Amino acid sequence: MNRPLFPPISRRFLRVWQRNLTVYKKTWKVSFLPPLMEPFLFIVAFGIGLSAIVEDLTYQGIKISYIDFIIPALLATTIMYNAFFETSFASFVRMRYQKTFDAMMATPLNLAEIITGEIFWAATKSVIAATLMIVGVGILGLIDNFSIILVPFLALLGGFAFGATGMFFTSIVPNIETFNLPMFLFITPMFLFSGTFFPLETLPQWAQGVALALPLTHLVRLVRAATLGIYHLSLLGSLAYLLLYSVFFYPLALEKMRKRLIK
Amino acid sequence: MTPIVEARNLKKVFGSFAAVEDVSFEVAKGECFGLLGPNGAGKTTTIRMLYGYTPLTAGELKLFGDDLAAHLRSIKYRIGVCQQENNLDPDLTVEENLQVFSRFFDIPKKEAQTRIGRLLDFFALTNRSRALFTDLSGGMRRRLVLARALINNPDLLILDEPTSALDPQTRQQVWNRLLELKKEGLTILLTTHYMEEAFRLCDRLLIMDRGRVLVEGKPGELIDRFVGREVLEIDSPDRKVRDFLAAQGYEFDDLGTRLMVCNHNCRELFARIEEVFDLKNCMLRMGTLEDVFLKLTGRDLRE
């Protein structure tokens, strides 16, 4: 059957986004505060505890403290986890167990709008999480640069990228347990090795190459530039990488979900 | 007048399995039309094609006179669908479930509130409006799904097994609601394997099996045609009874421990058999849609 290469997507995807917001407003106390606690535990453990024995380090030729080094990394990983969890585990539950997508398909919404709404919602959760974390960091007196206000915008981009990634995995996993594979093989290694807790330069050359191919590395670089107010030209490359990454995974997720659900 | 549904030679193939081979039917405005068939007959696939969930492999499908695929969006605004599962939002209350759905149809908030009030009232859910979906009984959940299917004031209501897994009380209640809607002129298309449900609700119906239509007609006419007004059943029959029936030229279905005589003047036969054999386990009853169904689709269990 003939069908257009790209399905028609109208503003109706916002209705799906709105549905998730309605549910979120009811459940945020349990579904949101605990995950938000985690980065703060990291800040306390690594930043305050570990920085007593770790010396200041040099970033882009400027000396910074260890805690200033890891705060942007924790912001970036929070962005990643919030979006990825939403479109992997949470979307899968809606698709498979709650049959929410089935119900929506009987309304004027089409599948592409449902999936787009889900990914935008994932990005929104990243924005909310990053914003709340900035407020928290500010209360702790750890904000160095006013350009930290750029982080929510980066959260939107990063959240969309990781939201599309999560949705891609949702479209191919046979069951919910299978999400452990991308979690342990993709998400967790990125969490540890994307220039998050130690500078990339300390890795061997080949490992640096691998890290540069991963999206979190680029998100960390962008967020770090914003929190420290240190800019350099190669950031444009990171921005371009995340945009291209999204442009690749978003249509891929749409197509794979169509293959999975429209039969 | 243009029929609400025109389905011509619908076909749906999944890989090498043809779920629907060749199904055609029409539903007129204000009519209640039933799709009957054993499990795996292709009812749900047919109904999913009807609301655009499943694309057709072949065939022609028009709703409200428009080609479905070409006018999918505008058609979906005009239909209400009650799927087999109670796929409501477990985190939301009764009222919120309906609100969320009203937004999918772009119904303004105020208008939605009015409709929600009316629907909750109609389905006797008003004093549970703030209850969470997870706290509702099976019957309430089903009523809520039905209410949700009506939120857009549809011109066609599509119901996939509306009363499966409901207790008799709730089933009666749902039937009454559906009959009321029918009286108001709503066109309804439903699948079911409760013959009583089909008999009570449907003006016309078709029985399908293995993806094909076996027969179509009004429930009463189908009964008359395939089993007759009355049916005679004889439990644990002995040889003499069988011989008697055969000798008198009565055709019967031999179910092993039970004989069934259809399509004859069973009232007369009943009187004669009583005279000759004095049988206590002989029963004269009305022919039912279930008899028609079993006659056409066979009595074997389906995988």
Image (cartoon, coloured by chain):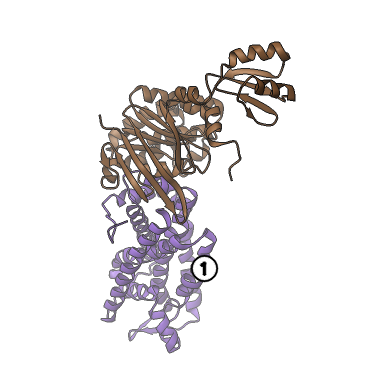
User: Which of the pair B31/A226 is nearer the observer?
Assistant: B31
User: Which of the pair B140/B176 is nearer the observer?
Assistant: B176
Report which quarter residue B190 is drawn in.
Answer: top left
Callout 1 environment at 10 Å: few (<14), some (14 to 19), or many (20+)? few
Q: What kind of residue is marked 1?
A: Leu
Badge 1 element: helix
Disc 1 marks which residue?
A181
Q: Position of residue A149 (x, y in %)?
A: 29, 66
Regarding residue A47, the answer to whether it shows in the image is no
In the rendered image, the quadrant that contains the N terminus of chain A is bottom left
Report which quarter residue B8 is drawn in.
Answer: top left
Residue displayed at 29% across by 57% down = A3
Q: Is residue B255 left or right of residue A153?
A: right
Q: Position of residue B47 (x, y in %)?
A: 41, 41
Taking B202 as reference, is A252 above or below it? below
Query: Mark 1, chain letter?
Result: A
Q: Position of residue A165 (x, y in %)?
A: 40, 65
Taking B261 as reference, is B130 above or below it? below
User: Which of the pair A242/A222 is nearer the observer?
Assistant: A242
Per the rendering, the colour in which chain A appears is purple
Residue displayed at 26% across by 77% down = A236
Residue displayed at 56% across by 16% down = B265
Q: Which chain is brown?
A: B
Q: Is residue B21 left or right of residue B135?
A: left
Residue displayed at 58% across by 43% down = B302
User: Which of the pair B272/B75 is nearer the observer?
Assistant: B272
Q: Position of residue A91 (x, y in %)?
A: 44, 55
